[in-house]
Amino acid sequence: MKVVAFSGSARKDGNTAIMIKEVFKELEKEGIQTELIQLSGRKINGCIACYKCFANKNKRCAVNDDTLNECIEKMLAADGII
């Protein structure tokens, strides 16, 4: 089992990350694999409403110049998301 957490805080390793890591300690005690993705400093564009995601039906954003598709991959592979 795997849980991925996304920290949207502007500060890398800030309070949000600290709190997520506390949750991870408990999950890891139960043998659950964890991964923290910190979005601070990463580029994520807003949706441009091109509707390619609907047409392609591939669960991916057609605009591939940011970190969004990487995040989607992590979410699809996870059993739980924080």
Image (tube, grey):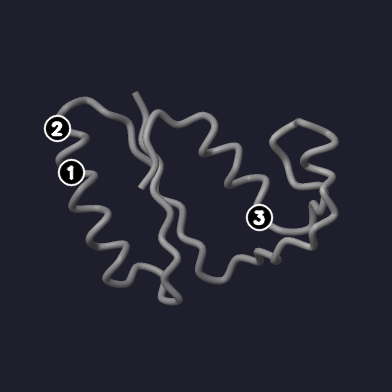
Q: Amino acid at mark 1?
A: Lys
Q: Tally the marks.
A: 3
Q: Earlier in the sequence, mark 3 or mark 2?
A: 2
Q: Pick the residue in front: 24 or 55.
A: 55
**Marks 1 and 2, how far apart in space?**
6 Å
Q: Is residue 65 above or below residue 28?
A: below
Q: Is label 2 in a helix, a strand or a loop?
A: helix
Q: Label 2: few (<14), some or many (≥20) within 10 Å?
A: few
Q: Pick the residue in front: 36 or 64.
A: 64
Q: Amino acid at mark 3?
A: Thr
Q: Label 3: few (<14), some or many (≥20) within 10 Å?
A: few
**Marks 3 and 2, how far apart in space?**
30 Å
The reply, left or right, for residue 42 in relation to residue 26 is: right
Q: Position of residue 3 (x, y in %)?
A: 36, 36
Q: Is residue 3 above or below residue 18?
A: above
- Can you identify the residue that label 3 sits on? 67
The reply, left or right, for residue 9 in relation to residue 19 is: right
Give residue 25's mark: 1
Q: Is label 1 in a helix, a strand or a loop?
A: helix
Residue shown at 51% from the left, 38% from the top: 75
**Marks 3 and 1, how far apart in space?**
26 Å
Q: Position of residue 24 (x, y in %)?
A: 24, 44
Q: Position of residue 9 (x, y in %)?
A: 41, 71
